[in-house]
Each structure stands twice: as C-alpha cells, then as structure tokens.
Amino acid sequence: PGTLHVVATPIGNLGDLGARALEILGSVDAICAEDTRHTRQLLAHFGIEKTLVALHQHNEDAQAAQLVSRLREGQSLALVSDAGTPLVSDPGFRLVRAVREAGLRVSPVPGACAAIAALSVAGIPSDRFAFEGFLPAKAAARRERLAGLVGEPRTLIFYEASHRIEETLADLVAVFGERRAVLARELTKLFETVLDGDLASLQAQVAADPNQRKGEFVLVVEGAPEDADATLAEGRRVYATLCAHMK
Ligand code: SAM
C-alpha cells in the first residue's frame, strides 16, 4: 500500500518550503489540498503539476474513504493545507485518523507552523505551552473560554484574524488583567512585526496604528504566575478546612 505524506507548506515566505517537501510533492500520485486553487499556485511556483483532490471541512469524511482505497491500491498521497502544518487549525485530522485506522502509513514532512514560529521569537517561557487555536467568534463564548484559562500556568498560544484582533485583545485585557504577551503578525512576510509588552500595551499599540491590525496574527500569552497558583491553593486549603469544620 501507499503512504500518506503530511506535508507542511510555508506560512508566507516560499523559501521555507524545504527540499524534501518538494521532492515528495513532486513524486506522489495526488495531493489532497484544502483549497486546490491556492495549492495549484504554490505548486506552479515550483514547476510541479499534480492531480489535486479537494479536502475541506465539508467533504473530509466522504473523501477519506476514497483516499484510503487509493492508498490500498498502492497510490501515494500528500496532504497539504493553505499554509503551515496541516491539522493545526486546518483540515486533515479525520483523514489521518481514517488512514491510521485502516492500518496504513502516515508520514510527516515537517515545516512551518505559525504557532511554533511565534513561540520561537516571543521570549515567553516555552518549556510548557498550550495551543488554543482560534477563540470562539461570539463574545460571550470567547470570554467564557478565556475565563477557563485564567489559572493555566502554561504559556498560551492563540491564532487570530485581523477583523477580530482588537476585540480579542480587549477581552484578554478584561479577563487576564496584567500579563506579558507577544503579538506576532505576518511572520516570514514583508510586514512581519513582533510586538511585546503587557496585554494592555499591546491593545494600545494596535489601537494606535491601523497597520498593526492588518494581516495574520499569533498571540502568545504568558501563563498564570506561580503566586496566583499559591493564592488559589491557599484559598482551596482554607475552604477545605472550613468545610471540614462545618460537618
Ligand atoms: N496550519 C497553519 C499553521 O501551521 O500555522 C495555521 C492555519 S490557520 C487557518 C491560519 C491562522 O494561522 C491565521 O489566522 C493566523 O492566526 C496564523 N498564521 C498563519 N500564517 C501566519 C503568519 N505568517 N503570521 C502570523 N500568523 C499566521
């Protein structure tokens, strides 16, 4: 049987597509892509012409069964998304699971990922982190999600789009208060900027400069401070003691 190669593509700078990614994209029988037009352009840049299969949120389950049959017949396939690593806030999870459940081989060609690229330049503790992807679009659900993360000691990584960056920063300030954070914009592209400061200063910098609201964003937020944990732990201890005395 064939292999499904999960291939990362650039998040902006085409020079980030590595030699092995090119070799595999050039040699597979077909490439599954989130947006075939977008991927055709990327491949054309590198002189690669391939059969493309559209694989997105709405057809992934249906396509997965057919793709598994193709692998069983001995065809080799690649999976790419529009940018970065497939499955990371992108389609592919259900296909990969279906291929694994069929007992077939899935092999990665690692490369760009906006979350990891942002973390690598943030200067915020990177030994433990939690990738939160996109926050919910609706304000109430977004604040609820953030409230659930207030005590999280690991560094938090969020993705955000330009039309919601101001709202998200406002909610982060409201729910998290003073916290160190980094806003990484347009990484590897012409207008790459990495702003740092506390959340309120990021909010002010973005409010002051319309250019800072354009493009694609990763937000890296420092985890809850240790002493907050200690206070919480002390609170829990006192509560438990009181409960014990009330019996
Ligand atoms: N699979 C991709 C990855 O590995 O990073 C992520 C895909 S997700 C649909 C797109 C989001 O990733 C954007 O809204 C933005 O938050 C982030 N992103 C992608 N490229 C970026 C870049 N060059 N600079 C900053 N953020 C980026």
Image: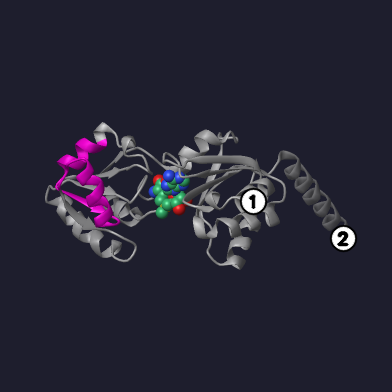
The magenta stretch spans which residues?
Answer: 21-49
Q: Which residue is mark 1?
A: 203
104 is higher (above) or lower (below) than 168: above
Number of callouts in the render?
A: 2
Residue furthest out toward the right: 245
Three-letter amino acid code at the position of disc 2: Met
Which mark, residue 163?
none
Q: Considering the numbered disc 1 on the image, is that residue within a helix, a strand or a loop?
A: helix
Left or right of 242, for residue 93:
left
Crowding around mark 1 (Cα neighbors within 10 Å: few <14, some 14 to 19, many 20+) is many
Say left or right for 31 vs 135.
left
Residue 23 included in the magenta stretch of the image: yes
Q: Is residue 118 left or right of residue 74?
A: right
- Looking at the image, which is closer to me, 74 or 52? 52
Q: Is residue 102 visible?
A: no
* Amino acid type, label 1: Gln
Cα–Cα span, label 1 and label 2:
46 Å
* Residue identified by numbered label 2: 246
Residue at disc 2, secondary structure? helix
Image point (77%, 51%), residue name: 236
- Height in image: 110 above or below 173? above
Q: Pinpoint residue 145: horizontal percent, then vertical percent.
A: 60, 59
Residue drawn at x 55%, y 55% is 165
Foreground mark, 1 or 2? 1
Where residue 163 appears, as percent x and y from the top left, is 51, 60
Q: Disc 1 or 2, which lies upstream in sequence?
A: 1
Q: Position of residue 162 (x, y in %)?
A: 50, 56
Does any portion of residue 56 appear in the rendered image?
Answer: yes
Query: Where residue 29 sits in the image (x, y, percent)?
Result: 14, 47
